[in-house]
Each structure stands twice: as structure tokens, then as C-alpha cells.
Amino acid sequence: MENTKKRYWRGIEELKNEPDFVKNAHREFGDAPSADAKGGEIFDGTDSNRRDFLKVLGFGVSAVSLAACQAPVKNTIPYLNKPDDVEPTIANWYASTYIDGGDCSPILVKTREGRPVKIEGNGVFNTALSARVHASLLSLYDNEKLKSPQIAGKPADWKAVDGEIMAGLAKIAAAGGQIRIVSNTIVSPTTKKVIGDFISKYPTAKHITYDANSLSGLITANGGILPNYNFANAKTIVSVGADFLGTWISPAIFSSQWAKNRKLDSSKEGNKQMSRHYQFETIMSTTGANADYRATYKPSQEGLVVAALYNAVAAKVGGTTISSPAVKVENIEKAATDLVASKGASLVVSGSNDAEVQKVVVAINSLLGAYGSTITSGSSLNYRQGDDASMSSFISEVKSGQVGAVIFYNANPVYNHPKGAELGEALSKVALTISTNDRADETGILCKYNTPDSHYLESWNDAEPQSGTYSFSQPTISTIFLTRQAQSSLLKWAGQNADYAAYLAANWSSKLSGGYSAWSKALNDGVVQMTPSSSFNVPQTGLQDAIASIAKNYKSSDKLELAIYEKVGMGTGSQANNPWLQEFPEPVSKACWANYATVSLATAKKLGLAQEVELDTLEVEVSIDGKSVKLPFLVQPGQADDTVAIAIGYGRTKAGKSADGVGVNIYPFASFVNGNISFSNVGNVQVKATGEQAQIARTQTHNTVMAREAVVQETVLSEYQKNVKAGRYEPTILTAEGKKSAMDVSLWNGHKYNNHHWGMVIDLNSCTGCGSCVVSCTSENNVPVVGRQEVINRREMHWLRIDRYYSSDAQAEDLSGLEKASANPEVVFQPMLCQHCNNAPCETVCPVLATTHSTEGLNQMTYNRCIGTRYCANNCPYKVRRFNWFRYFQTDDFDFNLNNDLGRMVLNPDVTVRSRGVMEKCSFCVQRIQAGKLEAKKEKRRPKDGEIITACAQSCPTNAITFGDKNDPESAISKILAIEKEGRAFGVIEEINVSPNISYLVKVRNKDRAAVKEEAKVEHKEHS
Amino acid sequence: MIIMKRLKNIILSALFTAFAFTSVNAQDVAEGEQIFKNNCGACHNTSDEALVGPGLKGIQQRRSVDWIVKWVHNPQAVIASGDKYAVELYNKYNKAQMTAYPNYTEGQIKSVLAYIDAQAAPPAAAAGAAPVAGGSAAPAGETNGGMMQYILLGLLGVMVLVLVALLSIVTSLSKLANSDAVTESGEKVSFLTKLADSGKKIAGNGAFKTGAALLVTLLIGKATIDAAYGIGMHQGYAPKQPIAFSHKLHAGEYQINCNYCHTGVYRGKGANVPSANICMNCHNVIKRESPEIQKVYKAIEKDEPIEWVRVHNLPDLAYFNHAQHTNVGGLECKSCHGEIEKMEVVEQRSSLTMGWCIDCHRKTNVNSEGNAYYDKLVEVHNKDNREPLKVQNIGGLECSKCHY
């Protein structure tokens, strides 16, 4: 009930109130850029004089008079022979499958006039999609892919390329030379069959599979498969370094499972139980940020933590304990107690790539009875199949000149393998080198033949993400460039009919009962479930040996160690040339457009690095055994002390304009443990400042909350169980009639909504901050990419941002404690978008009525009326309005997708592209509302709940966002609000009573903190 | 008086019986009409006149319903089965295949037959059976300039009156002055000189000068504003098209339903310019030799699409959806496009300005009849309003209905 007065801070600089921060905190848009920044003065108006004004005026007058003379003739060009199922201006949806290396998701593709414009989850399977899947749409329209096959860097035609390659292969095969196909994980069973056909034609051929983010050790420990985890069944989850909500295996699906046990209901009989999640990790990952309990370890302790956890669990359930070196990490004992308490509904996962560590994890899960409950038996996941050992031996084969021909099948090991540089140098020893990569990337450029594969949206394919579940791809657009599916290429080179579509159809028509018509139906649905063929046994492990190996390989030290991690948006860097992903702020650090070295505050002090202020920081040089990289450093609260962490996926050199030279490549710094790649390095890590200033583009400290309370409200489970309003801050105002709720005092008469009243509820308890909604919104609403410099200038355009607040562990009464940064802060994610206030402050200040209120509760923004005074942005308490400082399309200064004809194909034709000088913001996807209403009207009925849904709500993997009509008593949102109005629902900054149409639900942590709190309260009472 | 009353009763009861009689099948007939106009009308008449195919009047007397259903679903199969009537028909009409419509149910085909019969029946019954045109759309509003012009004309009139009044005052004043002069000199000044004199005096008058300057400024201002309003407005725009397609012939004379070619008009945002294959539905048989139709053939042969010139252009910032207006609102095409069926070359009849849109949204009643979407809205509206529910009452003037 009472205000917790907990202090939230968005960055160290906010907490410490550095003078530089304070100076900028009040300005929404930061400093005006200097004259040499992008754009001429004449256009941004910062330094224009009278002459400039006259020039612009003169130009304007003549342009208008010219325009008045004659209207340009516009043509309308219909089809010659219109396909039956295509009706211009009406969208078609096709089921397909996103495939990028081992990552794959069943999707639905929205096409307009024959071009894909949006990706959504395929409801038949699981609608959860990650930000990367949403962004992959833009990779289709990447202008820097290869436009035709190439021979030695020169464009060629397919016939010539095929002729030379087949002659080359025949020659090598005749001489008994070795042929290798190198790929990332292939999830497509039919593609594997094609490779099988190729190998039977060339028996010396061998297929090497590796993954940039390898899980080789996990696969080895589980008898050759990835276990099919089911977080939905888990009451206690312990993760040791596995970022399963952000990047590990299949994060979107894991998120949706995880969130099922985080949903609470404030009605009397409602569910008031939730899972408890422990995270042990080095960096502050998205998963760690969402955990109830979190503790840190150094990479050198990872194995020891797992061993200690095993021993703690074994001691409790009566298993054999095996002595292992002690490790001082918090919460292990507590985690073990909870795991054992919920035996049968407990799950332990580890992100380690060391098979010996994973064997211990398997043993823990066996002790806890996880197999058959939280690990689905009889089925496996297929997202990763890479084998580090065979890749390493392939590289040594190439180095020793034993390989005659190599085909890089959509794989870029020169960039994304730790030994990539060695491989790159040795490739000249291979007589025949072929790459099917979509561009002449780091590997492709070294190959003689580039035979570009088509984008997955242009391709036929199938995928088996988990055993027994098949997902199919069909082209949603004909090939844009002269590309050919890699499978067709392999078939051609194997001397078969080079038609993969026919091959696939034949394969499935024989596999599915029902023949070709069943195949057609499968394509239409996108997904087919069959009984999995593989049986799964709980792996037997040599536990003793495993722990011995751990004791040998993991030794706690106080030296500086390097942790390497994967970013939620950028991933392994395969889509690095995707501007949407480059501009996607990492959920925790809120940084984009580069990687950086993160260190904890204590470590920064130890290293003598001055605290960074906002975006300005120092460049550091991180070196290990002669290798070194220079990049900016960033203080990351919650990171293990004496570690420095750097993300993979950056430092591309041959990916394209958006990716090249952005950040540094850290793959070469990875080490090997037991033959597997380890994303850490415990060697001689040195970090020192180079003395150069550097900047990191972060969306973090923008739009501050101005120390207002009641922005984020949270509580712990035990308190919530006692009182559903726990943690709520309910502002009251003293009036002449006594104390009143702030929401009861208003100058306004309010609006009457006769028809619809659109609203949104965001459950802070389910939001993991994954950012799927951010990219989905970008895609749906034609949000422009502004680039690194403009993000630094605080001018990013995302309509929907996810605020991340760190909090301090100190009690509300402990004023000096609140000033201290916790080494391991709690984190809250809060999606922030236009709140569509009923008493909107922006509406009252617009001098031209460009922003007005609709009869359906929407706060409307009319671009063509806006004259750009920006009063509305200044008056918005949520700082969610975005100003078009420049024309972001067809402008060379913003050379991203909107600057070329192909890239503009991604635009949603139902949404206006905003021009320079106008304000924009979240519209609640009004185009979808209008379209949904029209569908209903055409069918002479009211819209059904769930039929009209915003892009963010549709893409949320955890269903944290509910959108709907508050006037419809049967809608999900009405039902939630009816219950939670007297429970967890609150409006952000309620006391100013702008009456937002978005309600948030209080975050509840499953922590035992109540006791401590009670004590503090008692003390407090005694004092007063 | 009594006779009148009786007459009225008789007429009323006659009308009632007519209505009761026809209303049994009204729904069927309406459905049939829709289907017929969208699909059959391009090739068949409801009279006994042959078009591409035979006239359909009395078809039910010639053939059984079963046969017709079979034929509609798959004419090729009927011909192939050696049915004598079918083969004769096929040969008679230049061996032109009728398009198969396998998706229409027997009921729907019967509705079409009912419609054909209704068309053939005496006009009174047919009129009763004709569906009530949906929507109570107001005719397209006049251009927003109309009112302004009247006001200006009025102002001009007032100005002229003022001028006349001033002139008469000046004249009478100078008469007074002149009468003195006459008595003094005894000379009679000619009328013309007098007029010139008074003219000079008026020209020299400060008030007049100001007035004239004001008038000129106002006129120039008005002309400028008019011209400025005209920028980007293309009312009356009738560009020459690459193929001299005549709406007058197709829509007017042959009464082909708009929807037959503009396939999106009830379904989508765009009405859509028809693809060449739609032309070919008829023109692979009819008028093949016409040079204009040869252009279509050539385009298909060369695989080069036809580049029609867009007549109606809306700026990108405005969202307009045909389905909302035609299907939901029940507007006739001509409400906005004018009498297309009389146009040899299509021209833009309406101004397509925002003022024009808004004007219509202010005046037009919502086509809420029988549409459950509006039921509650109408109920709420009628509680405190006598006026019918208009588009503006349901947010038809709001920005985000068209701009997003």
C-alpha cells in the first residue's frame, strides 16, 4: 500500500548525479549537433541566417509555382494476367519458416502486391518470435547481397559456373581428393538428404557442421542430441550461464514457456503461485535481469559452480557426493534447497560448452527427476548440431593441404570461428573453393566460386526444429537477384535435376499419408506434427571423471578474465548488415551500433578507468597473448568483478555498409576447453586505456524519469499473496473535501466513448525485455533507422522503447544506502510507448491541432498537419514522441534501407512515410484497427476480441502485452482490468492524472524479502 | 372525398399485395442480381437478345434446373457428354467456351434464375422485386468553392450598389454646384462634359480611390487564393489513355457491372484497374479485329503491361478505402466518380479535396441498416438525437480515420 520509495536509476551516471548528466537530463533531444554533424545548417535551422532563409523562400516559391503548372502524370500498371489469389491492396498470408543457421521458427508472412512486408508467428505451433526473426525481413531487401554467381570475383552466369565447378569436382574426385561441405547446423531433413545425395556421388566428400555459438559440449553430454527443455513445467529453474530468455538455443519459445509460470491473477481464486528462477552468470544477461535470485561467478568458476550445485543437491536427495574444489558463490545452497523442494518440477540448465560440465548438469537433472517432466523425453531439439572437434580437425586438414575442394554452405567460418584467420590463410591451398553465402563475405571473398543462395523468403525448404515437428518454407517472392537455392546447386553438381522444389515435394508426398494433397495442406498450414522417431534415454554419465576434469580445468583466480557473449539483437553476426538489428538496443546495456567492453564498477576503479558519463567514455585496449582489440568500455552493474565482457557479432569487414567496421570481432579471443569452443578466456587478459575518448550509442539515459516515483511498481510474492495491492503506489491529494485519489481530481470533462475504447495492459511480470516488440513495431510502422551518430544525438526514432531500470537493494529508509550502487542490482523492464492519455498533455499544446483525441480513445498524430513546433514532445510526461529531424529516406546521409529502391520495398504500404519536420509516435497501430473494423463491418458484425491487435502485442513471446477494446466486456483486456483494477494495475505517473489508456501490472519477484522488510518497518516505527 | 379515400385504400392494398407477393423471393432475386451482374452480365442478357452468349429470357422453360446447374458448374463436361442441346449451343456461338463456375451452389444458381424471371416479368413486379439501394447517400456535394463564389458575387453586388449610390450623390452634389454656375454664366454645359467632370471629380476623391484600391486588392487576393486552392486539384482531368477504352460503351450501353472489371471495388482499398486477362474474357471472341483491342493482344504477346494513366490521384498522406465506402457505406460509384457510364474518356468529376470528403461525411447518414456493427451505436445515438446517425457522429471527421 505504501510507496516503497525505492530508488531506480537508469545508469550509474543517473544514480551518482554527475554534473554532465544533470546538465543533459532535462533536455529530451540533447545538444544540437555541431556544424560538422550530419546535415547542413540550412536544413536543421541551427545556424541559418537571413540569406539562407531567402534562399529557401525563393526555392519554395518557385517550387510551388512549378508544381502548380502541371501535375506529373502517374501511371497505373495492372497485371497482364492477374493470378487468381492476388488482389492488389489486399494482403495475402503465407506460412513459411525462418531459417538462419540453426535458428528456425515457423512464421506467417504478410505479402502485399507480391512482396513480403511483415512477419508474424505461425499460431499453429508457437507464435513466439525473437527480434531477429522480425528483422530478417529486411535482410531480404539487402542491396549488398551478390546479384549473380561469381567466378573469381567477376559476375558470371549459372551455366558457366556449374560447368567449371562440375569439371573441377570430377577432376578432384577422380584423383581421390578430399571434398568437404562446411555448414552451420542444418535443421532441414530434406537438405540433409540432398547433401547425402551429393556425398554418394562424390564418396570422398564429408559434411562438417559447426556453430558460431556452439553447443557441442551440451550435445555430447546428452548422447548426441539437444534435450527438449520445457520451462513451462518448471517450478524452480536454475541457470548457470544459460541466457535462455535472450540467446540460448530457442529463446523466444523458452520465454513463452517461462512466462507461463509468471502469470498472476489478483482475483480471489486467482493463481498466486509462480516459479522461482535462480541465475548464476558472469555478465548481466537478459535472463539474469529477469531472475528472482542472481549471483555472479568468473568464467574460471563456471564448472565449479555446477559441481557445487551437484553436491548440494546430491547431499539433500541422498545421492553420491563427489568432492570438488570449493567455490564462493552466493545462493548455491539456497538454489539446491528449492530445487529439491520442487523435485520433479525442477530444471537446471547451463550455457557451458564443456561436455564435462554438461555431464554434471545431466546428473543434477536426473537426481531432480527432470527427465519426463521439465525435459521432455522422447524428443529432442535440433537447433544446434555443430561439432567443434570435427571443425577443428577440418581446419588442420586444410592447413596441411589435404583438402581438394570445399563448399561453404551458408557458413562464414573465416569470420565466426576462433581459428577463422588460420583457415582464411590456408584456403589458398584448396584447389576448388565454393561459397553459397548470400554475399561475398569474409569467407566468400576467399573462394573462387560464389554461388549465392536465395534468401529464406525466396526459398523452398523444410525444417525440423524439434523431433517430430516439421515446418515448411515456400517462396513468398520470386528471387530478387540471380540467386539459386544452395540445395538446387548441390543437386546440380551431383548430376541430378536441379529443382529442389520438386525434390522437396516428392520427398514429402511420399512421407505424408495422403500424398501430394497432404503436402499441399502441409505447405498451407506450415507445420506438421508427426510422432518423433528417436527415443530418448537419460544419458549415463561418467560423473567421477567429469568432476575430476572440472577440478583440473577450472581454478578460481583473482586475475582479470574475458567473457564473450552473444547479444540478443545481433546474435552471431550473420545478419550484421541489417540496420534494424544494428539499431536495436541491447536489452540490458541499451547500447547499439557497436560492441564494447563491459566491466563492473569495482573493476573499472581497479583498472583506473574513469567513470563514463552518459555516452562519452574512454577507449580501452583489451589484449590476450599478443591479440588485441580497441573498443570503448562501459560500466555494467551486475557483472562479475575482475571480468571484462565483449559481444560477438560485430567487427565484420565484408558484410556491407551497415556492418563493416562497426565494433570489433571477438571470436578470435575465444578459447578451447576439452576440444570445444569456450566463450571465455582465462589467459593473460590485459585491459588498459588508450587515452582516446570514445562514444557508445546508447538509448539508455535518454528521456529520464526525472526522479518521479511511481513509474515502476513492484513487490515480492509473499507480500502479494497477503495483499494483492502490495507494492502499489496510490497518490492522494488533499482537497477541500478531504483526501482524494489523484485520479479523482481533474480539470477535464473526460471523453465519451460510444463505440470502441482501445487500451493496453502490460504485465511487467512477464516482460523479459527481449525487444521482439521493438523490431516488430519498426517493421509495421515504417520507423526509420537513424544511425549511430543520431542515436548519440538522442534522436532515435523507435516508437516503442523498453526502459530498463536498475534498483538498489537498500531499504527505503536507508537514505545513504540508496545512493550506493548495488554490485548486483535488481532489474525492471518497462515497455514505454505512447500512453494514449485521455487527458493528453500533448493535445492541449499543439498550436495547429495536429494531435487530437479520437472517439475511440486514440491519441491521433496527423503528420500532414504538423508544423514541427515540438511543443507536444516537451509536454509529454512519458517522452515517447519522436521528431523527424531529417528526411530519413532517400538521403545519402542516412544510407540505410530507405536510401535504395530495394530497401524501400520493406515499407508497409498502409502507413505513411513521415517527412522531415514532423512529430511522430505510437499510433496503437491505427492501420490495423481500421482494417479490423472494416473486416467486421463488411461481415456485418462487431469485431471479435483478439482480431484487432497491435504489432507489439502480437509479437510478444510472453504475452506480456494485451491489447483490446475496453468497451467490450468480453474482451481479454476488460477481464484483466476488472480484476486488476483492485490489484496490480497502475498507470505510470498516476498522480498527474493524464489518465493513460495503458495500464501496467505490478512486477512481483519470487523472493523472500518480506521478513527483512518487516524488521525495517519495526525499526522505523521505533525511531519515529 | 369518399371516392378518393376508397381509391387510396385500393391502391394501398394493391401495393401491399404486390409487395407481399414479391417479397417472398426478394432476397433470392437480390442475390441473383448481384451474382448475375458480377459474372453473367458480361456475356448474357436477361432478355432474349444474344450478346456473347444467348439471351437468357425463358431459360427455365427451355432447360431443366438440373441441367442448368450442371452446365454452370462445368459446361465443358456437358458438351463432352454429347448432350445434343449443349453441342448445338456450342457450335452456334462460335465454339466459345463458357467460363465454369463450380463454386456456386444450386441455391445461388436458382437465385440467378429467379432474377432472370423477375426481369422478364411485368415491370410492376420487377420494380417491387428490385432491391432497395443500400445507403442513403447524399449526392456528391458541390465543390467547396461554390459557396465562396456566391459570397463574392454578393459582395461585388454590394460594391456596385455602393458605387451607384456614391455616383448619384456626387452627381446631385455637382448638379447643385453646377446650377450655381449656370445662373452665373448662363451657359449650358453639355451632358457629356458634365459626366467627364464628375468622373474627374470622383477620380480625385480620396474615399473613392481607397475604395477602388481595396476592391482591386480584394479581387487579386481572391484570385490568388483561388489559384492556391487549385494547386494539386485536378477536377476535370481527363488524360488520354494508351487504349481508347470507352466506359460509355461498356458500362453504359452494355451495362457491365463495375465490379466485373474493377475487382477490388467491394473488397479492397483499391478498385483496381483490370488486368488484361479480364478484357480477354470477352475479347478473345468479340471485336478481335479492332485496332484498340489489337493493342491489348500485342501487350499480352510482348508480355509488356499496359501503362494506363491514373485519373484519380490522392496524396500518399490520405488513406482511402473503396470497400469501406462501396461495400459498407453502400455508396454508388457515381457518387464520387460521376456518370461514368456516359463518359467516352474518363475524367475526374469530383474535386477529391479534403473539404469535399469532410462535406460528405457531415451530410451522409450511416448505412447502419442490417449491419450489426452499428446496432449499439445507433441505439445510443437515437437516445438523445432526433437526427439520423451521420458519418461525422461516429468519428468520420477524425484525423486518424484517413491519415496514418
Image (cartoon, helix red, strand yellow):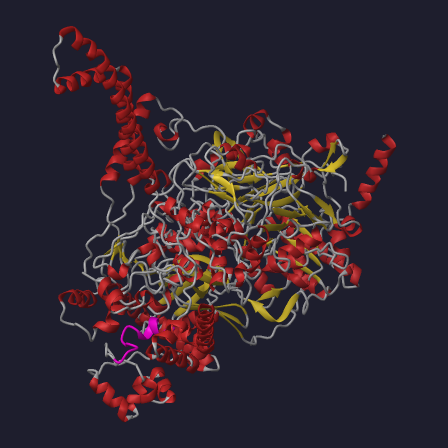
Which stretch did the figure color magenta? Answer: B35-48
Whether residue B102 can be seen here? yes
Say if residue A357 shows up in the picture. Answer: no
Comparing A80 with B360, the one in front is B360
Q: Nearer the viewer, residue A520 or A434?
A: A520
Taking the image as shown, residue A989 lies to the left or right of residue B298, namely right
| x, y percent for residue A651 | 44, 45
Q: Name the residue located 28 percent from the left edge and 52 percent from the top edge.
A: B348
Identity of the residue furthest to the top in this view: B184
| Residue A711, image quadrant | top right
Q: Nearer the viewer, residue B108 or A584?
A: B108
Q: Position of residue A158 (x, y in %)?
A: 26, 64
Q: In which quadrant of the rendered image does the N terminus of chain A lie?
A: top right
Image coordinates of residue A8 in percent, x first then y, are 66, 37
Give the residue at x 31% y 55%.
B337
Query: For the C terminus of chain A, which image quadrant?
Result: top right
Residue B394 located within the stretch drawn in magenta = no
Q: Does B237 sit above or below residue A487?
A: above
Most foreground residue, A91 or A889: A91
B42 inside magenta stretch: yes
